[in-house]
Structure formats: C-alpha cells, structure tokens
Amino acid sequence: MSGSEELRTGQCDDLKDKRAVVTGAGSGLGRSIAAGLSRAGATVGLLDIDAESTEETSAIIKKEQPIAQTMAITCDVTNETDVEKAFGALLKKWGGLDILVNAAGVAPAYRLVDLPVDKWRSALEVNLTGYFLAARAAAKIMIKQGNGGSIINISSKSGLQASKDNTAYNATKAGEIHMARGWALELGEYGIRVNSICPGNVFEGSKIWDREYIKASAKKYGIKPEEVIPYYVSRTALKCEIKGRDIANAVVFMCSDKASTITGQTLVADAGQVMVR
C-alpha cells in the first residue's frame, strides 16, 4: 500500500501483530480508540460494563475491517474479580498482551456544594480504581512476557487545568496522570512504557456529553445548550472540533515504535486549549 492510499483508508501497520486491550470500549473515546488500534493492525480486546455496546463496537470494527480480530468482554473495571477474569480470558485467547488503554470514565458535573458523595465515590472507583486494576493486571502479564509493552491512561485537559463545577473529574483526571508517571518509573526496567493522553472536549459518540451534561455546561457559562459545542470549539487555538479519531491517532503513535523512547509523558490532544506546564 502506498503512503497516499494509507492516508485515504486510514490503515497502517504500526501495530501489526500487537495485542491490545481498551477499557470503556463500548462507546465514545473507548470505541474510537479500539477502532484506531485495529486499523493500525492490532488485535483488540474490548472491555466495557455495557455488554450490548461492547458487541456493537466489535460489529462496527468488523464492518469497517472484515479481517479485524476483536474480543468483546463484559467487565466492571471497578471489580477486581471481573478485571482478573477479563485479562485471563484475553491471555488464554491470544497468549499475551502488548498494549493497554485505560479509557473507561465518568464525569459527574456538580458545583462543590451540590456534589453528592456517592457521585464523588463513583468517580474515584471508575476513574482511579478502574485504571489501577487494569494496569496492574496488564503489567503482570507484560513483565512475565519480557517483551515490554505500552500502557496509556486517557486523562483529560481537566487533569492539567481544572474546569469549573467538576471537582471529581478534575481530581481523578489529575490522579491518572500522576499514576502513569509513577508506573513509568516502576515499569521502565521491563521495557514497559506508560504515558497519558489528555484529550480536549470530544463530543462525538460520547456518553459523558449527554443532554444533561450539556445543559449543565450551558448553565455554567450562561449560554444556550445549542451554543455549548461552538463555545468550546471557539476556545481552542485551532478553532476545530476534536473527533474520536484524532485521539485514536495519538494513541496509535504513543503505542508504536515511533514513540519508543517516550515514557512518563503527557500528550495533550485538545486543538490548543491547554498548554502543558
């Protein structure tokens, strides 16, 4: 395939023969990332608590790429037993693991004085405990293999620059970045690279950006719901809406040999809204 054909089809072989797992693969960024990894040649394990959505992701990938290899597994990433079983099933099917992308997440948007403690705890469980459990399971496999690997935490620009009325999201997304840095130090001796990617606002296919979340954002900034997306786009340097495929491309790069010396770093893919300090 020529370079021009590759660009037109979106196919490449940067991750050929790699075995990947994506949490939160049933929708939004998780779905886009899973599809992107598959386009790059990886076999992809799809983990999500929503069984129907996970199967739908698998069907979407196979419709676009008939020879793609995927495995859909229903998994609650906050449940230690669920996570261990899921990674065990993937290991049994494919014999190993090269890539983990932690993308499952929730974003309860409340003012501090209105934030229910159950919503706070839910964010801690999904966004931190879920990332920890998946990374622990993946690291054990990668260390035993002795072939290195790549772990990506999907954080957010809010992990770098706090957003208003978003206590739980701000805290957990910042925590994901710092966990990744610590893991990079721990796992580097095994050739395992660990990085974070901080997307900007990705509206396409998002379960986070539902009607209620958009209404809350509109109220926060004193605008109409239909003005929310244009408003966020206007805050970026490039004045463009970020798509799921843009984040998937960043993930593929960070997992590929092209990024072989990059670890413990944070890549911001937000069209120029937040600058890394």
Image: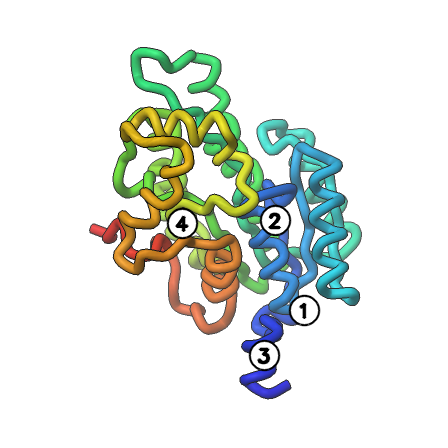
Distance between mark 3 and mark 1 Cα atoms: 18 Å
Q: Label 4, on which residue?
A: 199
Name which residue type carries label 4: Pro
Q: Are marks 3 and 1 in contact (CB under 8 Å)?
A: no
Q: Label 1, on which residue?
A: 17
Q: Is residue 120 left or right of residue 59?
A: left
- Which callout, 3 or 1, points at the residue further toward the start of the chain? 3
Q: Label 3, on which residue?
A: 6
- Which callout, 3 or 4, points at the residue further toward the start of the chain? 3
The numbered dot on residue 250 is none
- Which callout, 4 or 2, points at the residue further toward the start of the chain? 2
Q: Label 2, on which residue?
A: 31
Q: Is residue 156 left or right of residue 113?
A: right
Residue 187, given in percent of the width and then of the height, sits at 45, 53
- Which callout, 1 or 4, points at the residue further toward the start of the chain? 1
Q: Are marks 4 and 2 in contact (CB under 8 Å)?
A: no
Distance between mark 4 and mark 2 Cα atoms: 15 Å
Mark 1 Cα-neighbour bin, 10 Å: few <14, some 14–19, many ≥20: few
- Which callout, 1 or 2, points at the residue further toward the start of the chain? 1
Q: Nearer the viewer, residue 199 or 102?
A: 199
Distance between mark 1 and mark 4 Cα atoms: 27 Å
Q: Is residue 159 visible?
A: yes
Q: Is residue 62 left or right of residue 143?
A: right
